[in-house]
Image (spheres, helix red, strand yellow):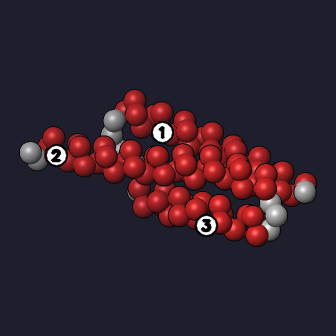
Amino acid sequence: MTPDIINALFELGGGFLLCMNCWRLYKDKKVMGVYWPVSAFFATWGLWNIYYYPHLDQWWSFYAGILLVAANIVWVAMALYYIRKNKNEIHP
């Protein structure tokens, strides 16, 4: 159980930091210096973890992983939105 709790703490920390990334992107309203497919890959990996953790009976990691994957998906969606919006403003 201890490894599960430690992993869950990393997942929670990552989820919190990703929420901060979402807030920053919302404030800046532009994506710069980031290759969004990397975040999309990690969002997909997070979805896999949501499926995988219950099979390992790692419930702490499962619940913490929900925050991580949700924040990652929100960031990717926001990034794609702002990339498209800024591209349309430059080339209407």
Q: Amino acid at mark 2?
A: Asn
Q: Residue at x 61, y 67 (%)?
A: 48
The circle on residue 88 is 2
Could you tell whether 39 is left or right of 3 in the image? left
Q: Position of residue 74 (x, y in %)?
A: 46, 46
Marks 2/1: CA distance?
A: 21 Å
Q: What residue is disc 3 on?
A: 48
Q: Position of residue 61 (x, y in %)?
A: 75, 54
Residue mark closest to the camera, 3 vs 1 = 3
The numbered mark, 2 or 1, whose residue comes first in the sequence reads 1
The numbered mark, 2 or 3, whose residue comes first in the sequence reads 3
Point out the image quarter for the N terminus.
Answer: bottom right
Q: Position of residue 69 (x, y in %)?
A: 58, 53
Q: Nearer the viewer, residue 4 or 90?
A: 4
Check if mark 3's residue and mark 1's residue have beta carbons within 8 Å.
no
In the image, farthest residue toward the left: 92
The circle on residue 22 is 1
